[in-house]
Amino acid sequence: MARGHAREDLLTAAVDLFAERGFDGTTTRDLAERAGVDAALIARYFGGKAGLYLAALAAELGEGPPPDLLQPERMAALLGRLEARGPGPVFRAAVRAHDDPAVQAAAREALHTRLVDPLRKRFRDEDRPQLRAEVVAAAFAGIALGRTSGAFEELAKVPAEELVRLVQELLTSERTIA
């Protein structure tokens, strides 16, 4: 990797490694090796591993508000990304709290920005839109993680298109989230 791009290389390595191994399973040495730079640059550019994690979360958020996950294209894209890269920091925040309070707060904020808030807008005219949004986001996170865990054989082998249709049917049913 180019020497003049150490900050960007670290950020790219962080997005990949935190998605693969999580915050706790990723060391600063791993990050530096993947980026091809000295580990001291993590502190220089990001203030430490937690700061780099926060920057990786921000990089994953991208620009503009995301579509809600009940849109078939969004759900299919998220499932595809999970299958290709594993659960990233946003999904991990849905199932496990971080020990570092700053990391936990940022991961929770990212989870709400990417998944819960767009759903809350979808449900704004219904009873308890925040609760409905959180139930759908949590259910989807569980389904997505279960698909990659190896614990659910049928779930793991069903084609993504079929899974998207089934999940949408289940998560948009009035009796499911009423």
Image (cartoon, helix red, strand yellow):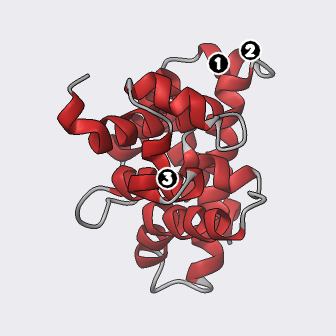
Residue 131 drawn at (x, y percent): 66, 76
Classify residue 142 by image quadrant: top right
Check the image and report above or below for 95 versus 167: below
> From the image, which quarter does the N terminus lie in?
top left
Label 3: element kind: helix
Q: Which mark is residue 156?
A: 1
For the residues labelled 3 and 2, say whether their Cβ atoms are less than 8 Å apart: no
Q: Specify the amino acid type for callout 1.
A: Ala
Residue type, numbered disc 2: Glu
The answer to whether residue 77 is left or right of residue 20 is left
| Type of amino acid at the residue the image marks with label 3 | Ala
* Picture residue at 67% right of the left edge, 65% below the top: 104
Mark 3 to mark 2 CA distance (whole Å): 43 Å
In front of the other: 61 or 155: 61
Single out the mark in the foreground, 1 or 3. Answer: 3
Q: Residues within 10 Å of mark 2 (few under 14, many from 20)?
A: few
Spot occupied by residue 176 in the image (x, y as percentages of width and height): 69, 59
Mark 1 vs 2: CB contact within 8 A: yes
Name the residue carrying label 2. Answer: 153
Kindly tell me whether residue 149 is visible in this rendering.
yes
Q: Is residue 110 above or below residue 45?
A: below
Disc 3 crowd, CA 10 A, few/some/many (<14, 14-19, 20+):
some
| Mark nearer the N terminus (3 vs 2) | 3
Q: Which residue is mark 3?
A: 43
Image position of 174 with respect to 2: above or below: below
**Residue 161 visible to the viewer:** no
State how far apart marks 1 and 2 are (Cα). 5 Å
Horizontal and vertical percent for residue 33? 48, 23
Placement of the C terminus among the 4 image quadrants: bottom right
Which marked residue is nearer to the observer: mark 3 or mark 2?
3
Q: Nearer the viewer, residue 67 or 161?
A: 67
Q: Earlier in the sequence, mark 1 or mark 3?
A: 3
